[in-house]
Image: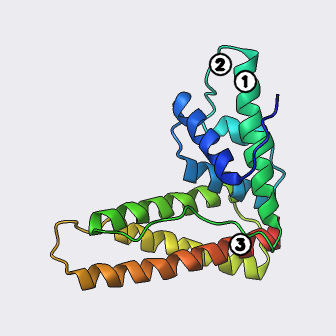
Amino acid sequence: MPTPYSSETEINLDVQRLLTKYDCPYKLHEVRAAFMGAIASLFVVDPVFELNALWDDAFPELDSEEALSEVQDVFLNQLWHALQAHTDQDDPFTLTPLENPASLTELMSQARIRGEELDAFMDGFFQDQEGFDLDPDAAESVSALEELIEMYAEIMNMDPAAPSTPLDLSSLSENMTKMNEMAESELNNIILICA
């Protein structure tokens, strides 16, 4: 029986619980972004296929019809439906909120999360397809996201033992905040144009 949720935060908690329970190789932030990319995709997308893909097409064996119903309800009825609401410009998609990093290691970890989110969105959006035409504005946003993925990778690959001052960390943190804002803006531009 479907569970009523009062917020996307509650849905996310249930999604996280099921990802952990069934040993999903993907994290919540990747799942949200992959589903959002699939929703925005120019291709016909089957949500059930997207759900199965989270376990690399080796969907876990569930011990009852109730367990299967729960997974389908949480991922397809609740999460997918909640994410579809972000195709409205008045309800933009948001990336995972991140705290102000207290160290370079923490900043690098946050860059990894952002890179994973953007990669997952792109995977969902492109659906393993190549060589198709995009609206010029959407294509520009895709290029911007590809550049941001590279920039997040550069931060991820920094040497955490390299000497740095609090000012260095503050400057890097400010830059990443700008990158995060740009990432959300470009994602939502793609969603609004293509979904």
For the question of whether residue 77 can be seen, the reply is: yes
* Residue identifier under label 2: 62
Q: Mark 3 belongs to which amino acid?
A: Asn
Question: Does label 1 or label 3 sit earlier along the sequence?
Answer: 1
Separation (CA) of disc 1 from disc 3: 32 Å
In the rendered image, the vertical position of residue 54 relative to residue 161, given as above or below: above
Q: Are marks 2 and 3 in contact (CB under 8 Å)?
A: no
Q: Are marks 2 and 1 in contact (CB under 8 Å)?
A: yes
Q: Quadrant of the C terminus?
A: bottom right
Separation (CA) of disc 2 from disc 1: 6 Å
Q: Mark 1 belongs to which amino acid?
A: Leu
Task: Name the residue at the top extreme.
Answer: 63
* Residue identifier under label 1: 68
- Residue displayed at 77% across by 69% down: 91
Q: Secondary structure at mark 3?
A: helix
User: Residue 102, how many percent across, how many down?
Assistant: 31, 69
In the rendered image, the vertical position of residue 136 relative to residue 81, given as above or below: below
User: Residue 192, how many percent across, how many down?
Assistant: 80, 72
* Total residue callouts: 3
- Residue displayed at 33% across by 63% down: 106
User: Residue 124, how many percent across, how many down?
Assistant: 68, 54
Q: Closer to the camera, 23 or 10? A: 10
For the question of whether residue 128 can be seen, the reply is: no
- Residue displayed at 28% across by 63% down: 105
Residue 188's tag is 3
- Residue displayed at 55% across by 61% down: 96
Q: Secondary structure at mark 1?
A: helix
Q: Closer to the camera, 170 or 139? A: 170
Q: Does residue 57 appear left or right of residue 65 in this picture?
A: left
Dot 2, crowdedness within 10 Å: few (<14), some or many (≥20)? few
Separation (CA) of disc 2 from disc 3: 35 Å
